[in-house]
Amino acid sequence: MSSSMPFRIIIVGGGIAGISAAIALRGPNREITILEQSRLNSEIGATISLQPNATRILQESWKLENVREKARGMVDSAFRVYNTEGILVNEIPLLTDKYGADRIMWHRQDLHQYLKQAATSSERPGLPAVVRTSSRVIHCDCDAGTVTLESGEVLHGDIIVGADGIHSKIRTFVLGREVQAHPTGISAYRLMIPSAKLEEKSPGFFAKINPRHACTSMVAAHECRLIMGPARNGDIYSIVGLVPDEQMNEDPNGASSWVTKGDLNKMLKTFEEFPEWARSTFQHSDSIGLWQLRDIDPLDTWTRGRVILIGDAAHAMLPTQGQGASQAVEDAEALGAFFNEINDRPSIEQVSSLLQTVFACRYERASLIQGFSRQAAKPATDEGSKEIKMRPDEFMNYNCMYRGAKEWQRQLEIVV
Ligand SMILES: Cc1cc2nc3c(=O)[nH]c(=O)nc-3n(C[C@H](O)[C@H](O)[C@H](O)COP(=O)(O)OP(=O)(O)OC[C@H]3O[C@@H](n4cnc5c(N)ncnc54)[C@H](O)[C@@H]3O)c2cc1C
């Protein structure tokens, strides 16, 4: 086929999954359009850590060598676990050559902005992706390769990547039925505090934890836990409080939205058995977000015709291992790897065969990690005990040793 027929790629959703897919799929004669429903296409005000399995892809496979510095990320040096008496009971060193890359903590907006720049910059190889905001997709024809926007406009793609998040619309068209994300019974408080404020106003906390030090700290009770760490070169400190819905002293059905405002006093009550140095920080966050955490069971398939689901649309999971976005990056890498040779408009047979290969490559691993994330949410101690039984590194080797889609294929060929 002649190179006058560009390979048209439509990506629905401009979150980390969609933007990563655009980076991975960039190439000569490829027209990439990202359709994003929001007006601004920016991430929320919270932190995120990508695990070595994903940072290796960013830095090595996609040659984004300066992503840590430019997006003000911090290489996590250790995972420290405290019990509710405030005693450090476990420290897992994270600076290791074992995984070939680091776990890096970012402010979500910094990482997203950096990745978007990489997807749309004219300085990288391949045609820059185009982001169209205020473009909500309401319909998708998987075999014809079309999406319809709310405005009525119809766009054609040789492939369509459904990266539209946990409440994915595209998922319904791929599966032919609606799959709702279901409540996991766990909610998450999210707080962000300037480190300078903690240093000044929470001396008890500062005596225990330096908020500018690149280290993740967890305080765990039987069911509730606080997971804390810095971002933006240490200028901000993030606290995530996981709590079972029935213990959170807030009404889980109080808001129609799944993200709502948390209440300081209720949060303090929920974490009343936690050390004072940890609780003393809550009041210094300008706002408290409360998220009802949802996930999905592994789907029957992620692909149909010209369409594939990636990211949370395909495998939304609990955040207990910080693998949700990291798995989205792996999905994107697999798309890039298997479509590497295609620069002219591919046939439908070529497209569906390659999308099936991407699915085969990604499904078992992403589904396992969904399951691990549920297991990692189980109580950290026996009932009534302060002894912490959970091991945050239980699944780390499996999660972090991943070497990409082509290596998966190579291993498969060895076995066959
Ligand atoms: C408390 C918490 C902490 C977490 N911490 C981590 C962590 O440390 N590390 C990690 O790897 N993961 C973490 N995760 C998970 C991670 O946030 C998600 O897995 C990841 O952001 C999913 O990215 P996505 O692009 O698939 O989906 P999203 O970020 O949801 O993006 C989907 C995009 O699609 C757009 N969209 C939706 N519908 C349409 C439509 N019809 N038309 C057009 N656009 C549409 C949306 O506006 C959105 O921009 C955490 C999650 C939570 C809740």
Image (tube, grey):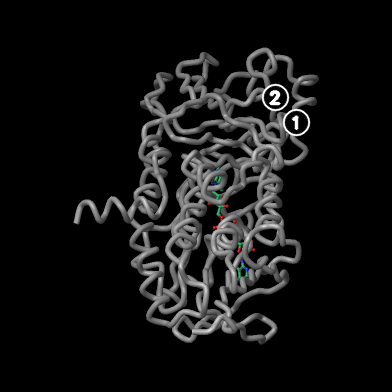
Determine crowd level at label 1: few under 14, some 14-19, many 20+ residues with C-alpha closer than 10 A: some
| 396 over 127 or under it: above or below | above
Amino acid bearing label 2: Arg
- Name the residue that disc number 1 marks: 235
| 307 over 70 or under it: above or below | below
Total labels: the figure holds 2
Q: Quadrant of residue 393?
A: top left
**The residue at label 1 has a CB less than 8 Å from ligand 1:** no
- Secondary structure beneath disc 2? loop
Determine crowd level at label 2: few under 14, some 14-19, many 20+ residues with C-alpha closer than 10 A: many
Q: Is residue 382 visible?
A: yes
Q: Residue furthest left?
A: 416
Question: Of label 2 and label 1, which has the lower sequence position?
Answer: 2
Instruction: Give whichever of 64, 366 is nearer the camera.
Output: 64
Say whether marks 2 and 1 touch (CB < 8 Å): yes
The quadrant of the image that shows the C terminus is bottom left
> Which residue does the image show at 34% across and 49% down from the upper left?
368
> Which residue does the image show at 53% across and 84% down from the upper left?
2
Spot occupied by residue 365 in the image (x, y as percentages of width and height): 36, 51
Spot occupied by residue 316 in the image (x, y as percentages of width and height): 47, 55
Q: Is residue 246 visible?
A: no
Amino acid bearing label 1: Asp
Q: Quadrant of residue 33?
A: bottom right
- Name the residue that disc number 2 marks: 212
Spot occupied by residue 98 in the image (x, y as percentages of width and height): 42, 30
Instruction: Give whichever of 152, 32 is nearer the camera.
Output: 32
- Secondary structure beneath disc 1? loop
- What separation in Å lies between label 2 and label 1 (alpha carbons)? 7 Å
Q: Residue furthest front?
A: 2
User: In which of the image's four quarters is ligand 1 placed?
Assistant: bottom right
